[in-house]
Image (tube, rainbow, N blue to C red):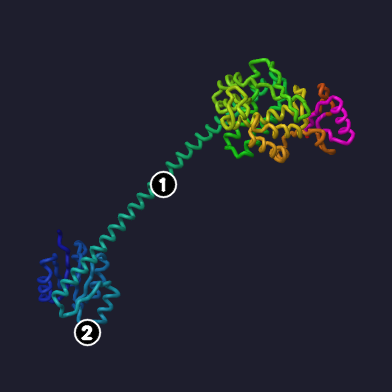
Amino acid sequence: MQKAQVLIVDDEQDILKSLTRILRQQYDVTTFTSGQEALDHLQDNPIDVIISDMRMPEMDGAEFLTKAKDVCPDAIRLLLTGYSDMESTIRAVNEGGIYSYLSKPWDNEELKLTVAKVLEVLELRKEKKRLTEELTQKNAQLSQWNESLEEKVKQRTEIIQKANKKLEKLLVSRSQTFRDILAALSAIIQQATGRPQQQVERIAEYSKLIAIKMELSEKEVSHCYLASLLHEIGFIGAEVEKEPEKIDEPQTDDVAICLAPDANAELGVKIISKIHRFAPLIDIIRYQDENFDGTGGPEHLAGTDIPIGARILRVTKNYDFFVSNPSNTARLRPTSARAYLKQHTKVFYDPKVVDAFLKVLEKDVIESEIDTCVGLDELKIGAVLKQDVYHPNGQLMITAGQEINATILNRLKHIEEAVEVPIAVYV
């Protein structure tokens, strides 16, 4: 390893020789008897340790070390001084920035130990300086990387934003296309069945509210709603020939109750299976006519083996058919229809679905502003009609928007009593 460079200044040659003899085995020693000559040497030669006598002619040690500090600021400076020179020593400490001082006469071992220690300090200073410079470089490099990264992030963000805008446009376009397909299918179903669109929409809204009440997932709620909108799609490819199923019900004064007609579900499944986005609706539509006790069709599924959407749809479409479907010649008042649903849980209907539906009719339907069918036994004075009211023979009796008064209500009750068919009123 390269030896440390030690520079010694003293006006006495004997002292210089003595100090050189002590230090030369471990260090490269350079000596001067003149402070100015030593300063000239420092201009062109790096030095690690400077040792200077205090009392010298022309330039004392304090002045020399002060100037040496300007020329070679990294070198560690030591002062040789006597006890009588304390005032000058203090000046050397303050102005020359000396690291330590050695008293004359010195102890050789102490001298060597002091020089070794100051060189350790010098190495630590160099290492600190190196690490500081390296840290500064790393910070500068990191700053450049950050700037580069920020620029890349900015560029990437712009690319993602552009892609998102394209995707949003595509989604809007696809959503619009999906809505257009749904609207077209609904119109075709309406044409095939001859039933008003608001009837299907009402059934779909009922199904959605039940699904929400039963805390189904957002996807399941959506599937229940869409399947209810399309549940009669099977009528597109076939005539509505099958009569509603009649069941004698002694609980309702031997009036024959008509369940909703078979929805031609298998044909409906064939139609919607052509559209990939309707795949989750297939089982709901296919099993909409299954009975909870397993006596229904097409596969005699029972209980929870029937998809939850199909169980919900069975309740909502039957209820709407009971209270308002024009083709139902054995319509029920809503109160009777609700009682019928409760009486036939575990037979036709899932008890949990019926319970949720009754709660929906009690509160959620009103808050959602769905047109609510009420019987004349529930119709209140001051209620405003949301739909036209028709005579069971199809004749228009009262237009939507009319407020119910005592005269209108009494007249409706007389007609209902005469024809023996409940009149559907929506408020």
Q: Are marks 1 and 2 in contact (CB under 8 Å)?
A: no
Residue 41: percent from left, percent from top: 18, 65
Residue at the farthest right position: 407
Marker count (numbered): 2
Q: Residue at x 30, y 75 (%)?
A: 94
Q: Name the residue under label 2.
A: 84
Nearest to N terminus: mark 1 or mark 2: 2
Amino acid carrying mark 1 in the image: Glu
Q: Distance between the residues labelled 1 and 2?
A: 62 Å
Q: Name the residue under label 1.
A: 147
Q: Characterize the local packing of mark 1: few (<14), some (14-19) or many (20 or more) Cα atoms within 10 angstroms.
A: few
Question: Quarter of the image containing the N terminus?
Answer: bottom left
Q: Characterize the local packing of mark 2: few (<14), some (14-19) or many (20 or more) Cα atoms within 10 angstroms.
A: few
Residue 381: percent from left, percent from top: 85, 38
Work out whether 25 lies above or below 141.
below
In this view of the protein, which residue sits in the foreground, 167 or 140?
Answer: 167
As helix, strand or loop, the secondary structure at mark 1 comes to helix
Amino acid carrying mark 2 in the image: Ser
Q: Is residue 421 magenta?
A: yes
Question: Quarter of the image containing the C terminus?
Answer: top right
Work out whether 95 lies above or below 124.
below
In this view of the protein, which residue sits in the foreground, 407 or 156?
Answer: 407
Q: Dividing the picture into quarters, in which one does residue 129 lie? A: bottom left
As helix, strand or loop, the secondary structure at mark 2 comes to helix
Residue at the farthest bottom position: 84
Q: Dividing the picture into quarters, in which one does residue 179 lie? A: top right
Q: Residue at x 64, y 21 (%)?
A: 233
Q: Can residue 65 be seen in this view?
A: yes
Q: Give the range drawn in magenta.
A: 399-426
Classify residue 99 as left or right of residue 392: left
Residue 261: percent from left, percent from top: 69, 22
Q: Is residue 141 magenta?
A: no
